[in-house]
Image (spheres, rainbow, N blue to C red):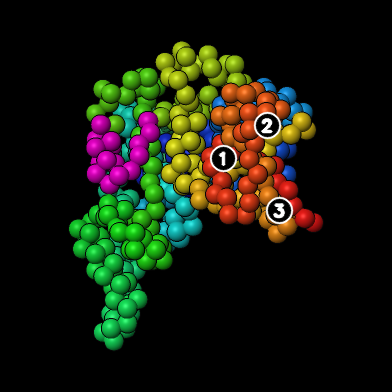
Amino acid sequence: ALTAGIVGLPNVGKSTLFNAITKAGAEAANYPFATIDPNVGMVEVPDKRLDRITQLITPKKTIPTTFEFTDIAGIVKGASKGEGLGNKFLSHIRQVDAICHVVRSFDDENITHVDGRVDPLADIETINLELVLADLESVEKRIARVAKVARTKDKDAVAELTVLEKIKPVLEAGQSARSIEFSEDELPLVKSLFLLTTKPVLYVANVGEEDVADPSNNEYVKQVKEFAASENSDVIVICARAEEEIAELEDEEKAEFLEEMGIAESGLDQLIRTAYHLLGLATYFTAGEKEVRAWTFKQGMTAPQTAGIIHSDFERGFIRAETYSFEDLDKYESLQAIKEAGRLRSEGKGYIVQDGDVMEFLFNV
Ligand code: GDP
C-alpha cells in the first residue's frame, strides 16, 4: 500500500499527531490481513458517499477503505552526512510515497524548541536541506556516470544528462527538486532517479487550540503557506493535541466537539483526504446486499487492475465489469432505477476506472 511518512523536527507534535492517528485507527476486524508495524498507523478514509450508498443499499456490513501513515522519527541536522540516526531517517523517507512535514506553529514556553525559538521557515529549511544534500549527492554520482556515455552521443544518456543538469543547480541553491517544472518527456526520467525532494509534500502546520477555528491571525501559518506555495505544495492547519482528544470520541460526540471548536471537519480527516489526493489515489465501491465496501486504487488504473486489488483471480480471469457511477445511484436511488434509466454500463478490459465508480466484476475462475 502507498504510505505517507510523518516527519518534522523534535518537539513539533509528531508523536501527538501519530497518537491521534493510532487512536482513530481502523477497526482491525475489518482488515484481518493487514500487517502490524508499530510505526504504521492505519486509518479509515472518511467518505460521505459510502454513508449514502449504505443508506440506499442497506447492506449487512460497510467497510471503508484505509490509508497508512508511517511515523518517521528522529531527524537530526547532519542526516545527509550520516550523523546519528540520519542515514536511517533518509532510508525511511526513501520508502514512503509522500511526506507529511509537521511544522511547529504554536507558542508554548513550557515546550522547548530544539533550536531555542519557534521559527517554522527555519525548521522547514533544516529538514529540507538534509534531503536536498542527499539528493545532490545522488545527482552528482549519476552525472559522473552518465556523462561518459553521453559523450558517445547515446540518446538516452544525453536526455538523462540534460535532466540532471537541470536539477543540480536548483539543489545547489538549497531548493527542492519539486520546485522545478519538468516536461512530459522529462518526468519518467526524473522518476527513475528516486530523489527525495521530488516526493510530494504536505506541510502540516500544528497550531494551538486557540487558533484552530481561525488560523488567519497566526503569523507562523502565514509563513508556512507562503513557502508551500513557492514549491507548489499543500498546507493543512491542525491542532495535534485537540486531534488526540477527538480521535477518542464516538461519532456523535465528535460532531459536537468540532462544532464547539468551530471547525467543519477534523484536522485528521482533512489530513487523510489531502494525503490521499496527493498520492493520486481514488476510490471505487462494491455494493451488494451483504457488504458495501470502498477500495483504493491509483488514478489511471484499468478495470482488471482495480479488480486485482480485491483478488488476483479477479484480474487474471477478468471478463467485464458492470459499472455505474455514485452520482447515478445518488440520483436514481436503486440499481433497478439505474438500469431503467439506461445508466448501467458494461465495461471491458481497457476501461479506466473513475473515482466514485460502483463496480461488479465478472470473471472466469
Ligand atoms: P515530537 O517530538 O515532534 O513527536 O513532539 P510531541 O508530539 O512529543 O510534542 C512535543 C510537546 O508539544 C508535547 O508536550 C505535546 O503535548 C506538545 N504539543 C503538541 N501539539 C501541541 C499544541 O498544539 N499546542 C501546545 N501548546 N502543545 C502541543
Q: Which residue is mark 2?
A: 339
Q: Earlier in the sequence, mark 2 or mark 1?
A: 1
Above or below 36: residue 21: above
Above or below 240: residue 68: below
* Residue type pointed to by label 3: Ile
**Residue placed at 28% from the left, 36% from the top?**
225
Q: Secondary structure at mark 2?
A: helix
Where residue 179 appears, as percent x and y from the top left, is 27, 52
Cα separation, mark 3 vs mark 1, equals: 21 Å
Where residue 185 appears, as percent x and y from the top left, is 34, 63
The quadrant where ligand 1 appears is: top left
> For the C terminus, which image quadrant?
bottom right
Q: Nearer the viewer, mark 3 or mark 2?
A: 2
Q: Secondary structure at mark 1?
A: strand
> Which residue is at the front of the view, 155 or 137?
155
Where residue 156 appears, as percent x and y from the top left, is 35, 76
Cα separation, mark 3 vs mark 2, equals: 20 Å
Mark carried by residue 319: 3
The answer to whether residue 229 is magenta is yes
The answer to whether residue 41 is magenta is no
* Residue type pointed to by label 1: Thr
* Residue type pointed to by label 2: Lys
**Residue placed at 29% from the left, 41% from the top?**
228
**Over which residues does the magenta segment extend?**
222-237
Q: Earlier in the sequence, mark 3 or mark 1?
A: 1
* Residue 124, quarter of picture: top left
Q: Which residue is mark 1?
A: 283
Direction from residue 360 to residue 220 in the image, left or right: left
> Which residue is at the front of the view, 312 or 63?
312
* Residue 51, quarter of picture: top right
> Which residue is at the front of the view, 32 or 331?
331
> Which residue is at the front of the view, 10 or 228?
228
